[in-house]
Image (cartoon, coloured by chain):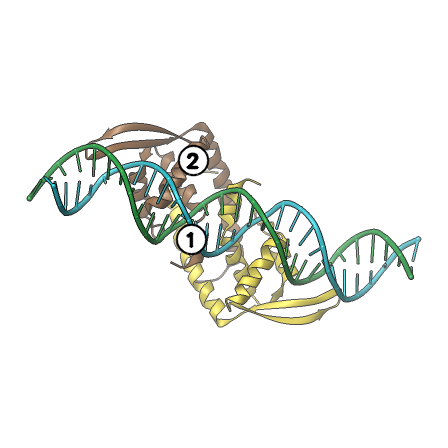
Chain colours: A yellow, B brown, C cyan, D green
Amino acid sequence: MRSWVAQMRKGLIELCVLGVLRDGEAYGYQLLQRLGEADGLSISESTVYPILARLAEDGMIKVRVAPSPTGPPRRYYRLTTLGQDRLKEMLTYWKDIRLAVEKFHKGEQA
Amino acid sequence: MRSWVAQMRKGLIELCVLGVLRDGEAYGYQLLQRLGEADGLSISESTVYPILARLAEDGMIKVRVAPSPTGPPRRYYRLTTLGQDRLKEMLTYWKDIRLAVEKFHKGEQA
DNA sequence: TAAGCTATAGCGCAATGCATAGTAGCTAGT
DNA sequence: ACTAGCTACTATGCATTGCGCTATAGCTTA
């Protein structure tokens, strides 16, 4: 994969993770699949799990362990109040930067 | 500045630089000011010049030196054919990832 | 000669995506 | 019982980038 792709994803994957969790709790593997549904966002475990670990360490999400019907116990993550605030902040900035990008690419077709 | 802000900018600043250069050549300081016009994209020299150096090294832009009426000589950068292709690629991916982010944040207000 | 603006450049750090590899629980087939 | 295959999570290490900080040099004005 071209290196600039990885760079462009930085931060945005975390934003998407928080976005999914906003709809309710989810476990790691589930997040992996949800995120993979979007074009241009195919993702691997080695990307998602570190993000979850960081978010948990920062108090943005909380973990709940529950048995799985088809494998090892699942770790369900859900947003904390702190996490909701962070999501709000990030969305605000996302809006700004999205407008910035589009400002410099008016009238262009990819 | 919060660390996630820097992460979210990664790659997108370069995309904006290419976007500005698509309208015609520009020198570093000029780019700095153009980019600063956008909300959420205030930028410093230590960010722009390394980007220009990288882009030049990769053959995406070419440099032309010309005297300035008000200071040291300016280095004018302009897109090469390679750079135009890269910009196209990046815009395609940008479209994908923008849709991805919005997919996971439908119905939300920042 | 000193200040102040313009314009460019280099060093070093922190953070992240991701390739690679490994661990462990559960089910089904032979 | 053994193997294969799926689910779910973890660990290591690298490359890349944004950016704070600092330095340099040309030009004008006082």
Q: Is residue A107 visible?
A: no
Q: Secondary structure at mark 2?
A: helix
Whether A89 is drawn above or below A67: the answer is above
> Mark 2 near mark 1, Cβ–Cβ under 8 Å?
no
User: Which residue is drawn at the image coordinates 34% and 52% (left, top)?
Assistant: B39
Q: Secondary structure at mark 1?
A: helix
Q: Cα distance, mark 2 to mark 1?
A: 20 Å
Sequence-first disc among 2 and 1: 1
User: Which residue is drawn at the image coordinates 42% and 53% (left, top)?
Assistant: B6
Place of residue A107 in the rendered image (x, y in percent of width and height, measured from the top left):
40, 39
Amino acid tagged 1: Ala
User: Which residue is drawn at the image coordinates 49% and 67% (left, top)?
Assistant: A83
Place of residue A6 in the rendered image (x, y in percent of width and height, measured from the top left):
53, 46
Q: Is residue A10 left or right of residue B31?
A: right
User: Which residue is drawn at the image coordinates 40% and 36% (left, top)?
Assistant: B53
Residue A20 or residue A73, whichever sits in front: A73
Amino acid tagged 2: Leu
Q: Which subunit holds the residue at mark 2?
A: B
Label of residue B6 in the image: 1
Q: Quadrant of residue B62?
A: top left
Whether B8 is drawn above or below A104: the answer is below
Q: Is residue B23 visible?
A: yes
Residue at the spot of label 2: B55
Q: Is residue D30 left or right of residue B54?
A: left
Label 1 Cα neighbours within 10 Å, binned few <14 / some 14-19 / many ≥20: few
Q: Is residue A49 left or right of residue D5?
A: left
Residue B64 or residue D10, whichever sits in front: D10
Residue B75 or residue B90, whichever sits in front: B75
Place of residue A34 in the rendered image (x, y in percent of width and height, measured from the top left):
61, 57
Label 2 Cα neighbours within 10 Å, binned few <14 / some 14-19 / many ≥20: some
